[in-house]
Image: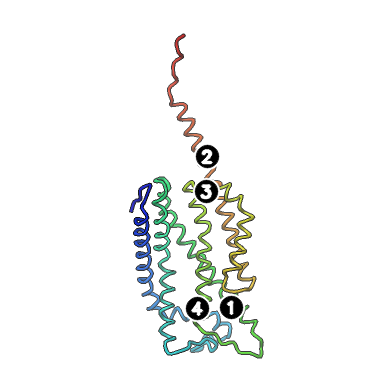
Amino acid sequence: MARTESMPLFAHLRELRRRVLISSISIFAFSAVGWAGYRTIIRILSAPICDLRGIHDSANCGILYINGVLGPINLQIRVALITGIVLSAPIWLYQIWAFTAPGLHRKERKWTLLFVVVATPFFAAGTTVAIKILPVAVRMLIGLTPSTLTNLIRFDDYLDFVTRLILLFGFAFELPVILVSLNLAGLLAGRTIIGWWRIAIFLIFLFTAAFTPTPDPLTMTLLAIPLCFLFFAAAGIALLVDRKRAKRLAKNAISDDVASPISPPEAI
């Protein structure tokens, strides 16, 4: 849906509704995969705790439990929805960008497809990192349990922890994609990005400290370090793009000067 320069409020709302509807349908469609593979997903998610207790060959993990008559069905629905959100990431990421892209100039809209193509693997990389550090976080946190106590864990609470960790890492890894996309669209200069490095590092550590699902410094640092690296990588790419853009503009300016006819001198 192409927008004009001045788009009415109701047109914005209709466009937003359409994007939300497409995203919701895609999430529910991919949720069928989570529903069908529910038992396999549960086994994968509970592996860090089961392996920690050395009972991964057992029928259950012992310390993980579900509470209530409706507990199993509620858990299956939640697992299915979370799976749908993760698997449908390319679709709803595109919808987010496509909602804002028509407000850009025609030249800037061409980066929409590039944004989606790059944003999807970065989101997947973030979720992969989260899954990799999950056993480390679980081992450290459960290791704080006193030897005189038994730590029984509701799977609902454990699923909340895993979900927040995975989605947080996935969204956090979109930071360089957003910065580079804004730079390619001509909305943010590379010098501006690199000039923010002190504030960026502070905000990254503040963000990870506030939103990581665990209060331990290990999880916070494991997320903050790659984000800092990705920020500087995005700044470097933006600087290269700006340099290339400046050379192209200078070359075009010289070509225009050469191509412009020289006016004859006025008669005295």
What whole-number distance in Å separates the C-alpha atoms at marks 2 and 3? 14 Å
Q: Nearer the viewer, mark 1 or mark 4?
A: 4
What's the residue type where badge 4 is placed? Leu
Pick the front one: 259 or 57: 259
What whole-number distance in Å separates the C-alpha atoms at marks 4 and 2? 50 Å
Residue at 48% in and 32% down:
253
Q: Which residue is mark 1?
A: 138
Q: Secondary structure at mark 1?
A: helix
Residue 57, image x, y percentages: 51, 87
Question: Vertical placement of 207 versus 259: above or below?
Answer: below
Q: Residues within 10 Å of mark 1 (few under 14, many from 20)?
A: some
Residue at 43% in and 53% down:
114
Mark 4 vs 3: CB contact within 8 A: no
Q: Secondary structure at mark 4?
A: helix
Q: Residues within 10 Å of mark 2 (few under 14, many from 20)?
A: few
Q: Which residue is mark 2?
A: 246
Q: Which residue is mark 4?
A: 159
Q: Quadrant of the N terminus?
A: bottom left
Q: Which residue is mark 3?
A: 188
